[in-house]
Image (cartoon, rainbow, N blue to C red):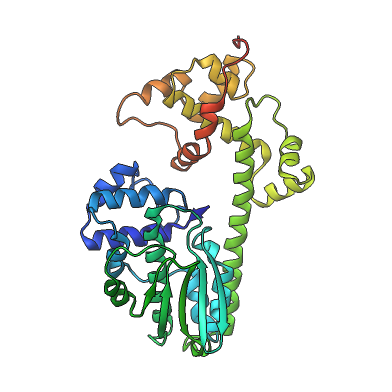
Amino acid sequence: MRDSGQMFLMAHQSMVSAGLDVNAIYRRIGYDAQKHDMREHRTLHELQLQFWEAIEAVSGDPDIGLHLCPYMPVYGGEILEYLMLSSPTFGEGLARVVKYLRLVSDAIETRVLVEGDTLRICGVVTRLNAPQLRHTEICTIYGMIQFSRKLTDNHARLLRVGLRCKRISPQEEYDRMFGCPVRFEQPESEIVVERSLLDYRSPRCNAELFRVHEELAASRLSSLWRQDLIDRIRAVFSRRVEFMDCQLEDVARELDISPRLLRYKLSQAGTTFSDLLADFRMILARRLLTRTEERLDHIAYVTGFSEPSSFYRAFKRWTGLTPIQYRDSHRQPGERTGANPKQQDDAEQLLREPLQARPAPRSSVR
């Protein structure tokens, strides 16, 4: 599960506005904000736990999510906002936004229910269970409310809010922040408003723009599905002990799809099986060189080379350095050569377990 960079950017902006020591928070989680375009970079949802643990520690505030809410910028400037604005009514726009919520986060599950005179927008905003993720829930629900108010010129009249988390601050503080009664320890998160909001007509509705915006949203969602396939293939790679006999047919069998379909889907994603395998072997080799003291013949073995000389040539082609030069350069602070930041992120997440699990070769590769 991954979250869009827009969510991280909003959290960053709220922390800065609230006067928190952002640099201290990032140091705690080992994040370098200069490396990435926050808006474009999708982060693993699991990292939110570390993120909020660091914010709690630096701020000393166990209810920091609630107290960051007034500083949060309103979500905007993204395809979901344009989709809502160009829709004829709030209800039609909402139906489309729910369909494309993956563009914001893989972890959000939302349903829209009409019950009598009320409209319930309910579901979960995180599938992980950890006390610190109460901040994700509170900030997300607050952000959804502010987004709805912005789109409807404050016509969204709240009746109540339901949260899965427990209450920490006084009840009146939550009620005041959300502008309505807040209930805690509910089965799922929910925003309850008057049903009439569904019929609110957007003054900016435009049928032609609506079609363009939905096509763009569908295209971006399709890109995420293609990335899902690549991530599943990388997960299969990460479970393998050796790569010398790693064939597309074997991976297709583990993914329960035909080899022909796998080739087609990869071509649609703009890559090939051999390219993915080569990239993964490069990531693994770099990580073993910089994070361990493994012998080079062992690294050559586990990355699928029958001869160390073949490994040397491939690694020089990948990075412009020999394995020894690459290892030595990473022992000197400030020197980083030939590595793509995105691939380093993938290595950190995809190779954490394989690094621990890979056995030594049965015999030394010569």
Rendered image quadrant of residue 170: bottom left
Q: Position of residue 56 (x, y in %)?
A: 28, 52
Given residues 204 and 356, the one toward you in this image is 356
Rendered image quadrant of residue 220: bottom right
Q: For the point 71% across and 38% down, which residue is it?
A: 251
Q: Is residue 276 visible?
A: yes
In this rendering, position of residue 173 left or right of residue 157: left
Q: Is residue 209 visible?
A: no
Q: For the point 51% across and 16% down, which residue is it?
A: 296
Q: Position of residue 70 (x, y in %)?
A: 28, 70
In this rendering, position of residue 15 left or right of residue 78: left
In this rendering, position of residue 268 left or right of residue 280: right
Q: For the point 56% across and 84% down, which residue is it?
A: 115
Given residues 339 and 22, the one toward you in this image is 22
- In this rendering, the count of numbered labels is 0
Given residues 321 and 218, the one toward you in this image is 218
Q: Position of residue 102 (x, y in %)?
A: 54, 62
Q: For the point 63% across and 13% down, which residue is it?
A: 362
Name the image quarter holding the C terminus.
top right
